[in-house]
Amino acid sequence: MSAIVLNEKMEKASELALPESFSGINPHNLYLYVKSAQAAQRANTAIAKGRSDVRGGGKKPWAQKGGGRARAGSRRSPIFVGGGKAFGPQNNRNYDLKVNKKQKKLALNFALNEHAQNGTLFVVDSIEIASGKTKDAMAMFKLLNQRDTLFVKSLLDEPTFLAFENIQATYVVESNELNAFLAANYRSLVIEKAVFEALVSEAK
């Protein structure tokens, strides 16, 4: 598989081959990483009051015997309206899922290889919008003719960030922020040549 090298006009100029180690990776590595990333995004704010948290219930609702009804000790019981919730959600749950470094690397390499197979992995010399204007970033994006795109720079400068910020179909990150979840979440990927070469050298 190969990445498509683009010139300044976003036209195909050549290709850069991916290492053989990028192919044959088990897709389960990507599944585990995406599952972990989504779990980390959970707000974990759902909480329900148990019977010990509900106000009231100090007095026994009715006598233990003689009424012909089941015995009851408190109106805070889950069987009463306004009582506590039995086995309700609590916000002290830990949703974190561990993914080791090797799996993270394999997941990213698999995502890059998938983009290469689909012809949506692009390499450019530089991603820079010196003017900081959205219309200039939009012009670059339109030349790609892709539905949505992740741009990866070695170092993200403020004008480039501001230029892409208001384009919903694009997202710009630095090389150290690139991960398998982001790569898999976008239908195309544009990487600076220096970043691409670093990724390839790490895989060897």
Image (tube, rainbow, N blue to C red):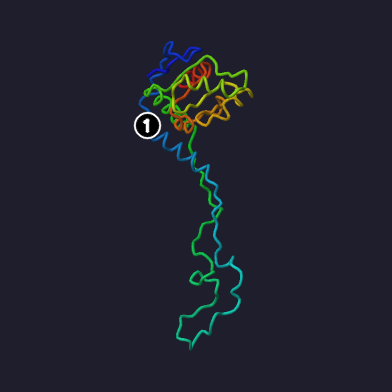
Residue 90 in which image quadrant: bottom right
Instruction: Spot the residue most to the right.
Output: 158
Q: Position of residue 8 (x, y in %)?
A: 51, 12
Q: Taking 90 as reference, is 203 above or below it?
A: above
Q: Taking 72 as reference, is 135 above or below it?
A: above
Position of 7 with respect to 130 (left or right) is: left
Residue 20 in which image quadrant: top left
**Which residue lies under the disc numbered 1?**
26
Position of 155 with respect to 39 (left or right) is: right
Task: Name the quadrant of the C terminus.
Answer: top left
Total tally of numbered discs in the picture:
1
Instruction: Spot the residue most to the left.
Output: 24
Q: Position of residue 80 (x, y in %)?
A: 50, 72
Residue visible at 58% across and 67% down in the picture: 52
Task: Name the quadrant of the N terminus.
Answer: top left
Instruction: Spot the residue most to the bottom.
Output: 66
Q: Nearer the viewer, residue 153 or 141?
A: 141
Q: Position of residue 163 (x, y in %)?
A: 59, 24
Q: Position of residue 175 (x, y in %)?
A: 55, 24
Mark 1 neighbour density, 10 Å: few (under 14) some (14–19) many (20 or more) = few
Q: Taking 98 as reference, is 166 above or below it?
A: above
State the SS at label 1.
loop
Q: Nearer the viewer, residue 40 or 56?
A: 56
Instruction: Spot the residue most to the top.
Output: 13
Residue visible at 48% across and 26% down in the picture: 149
Amino acid type at image mark 1? Asn
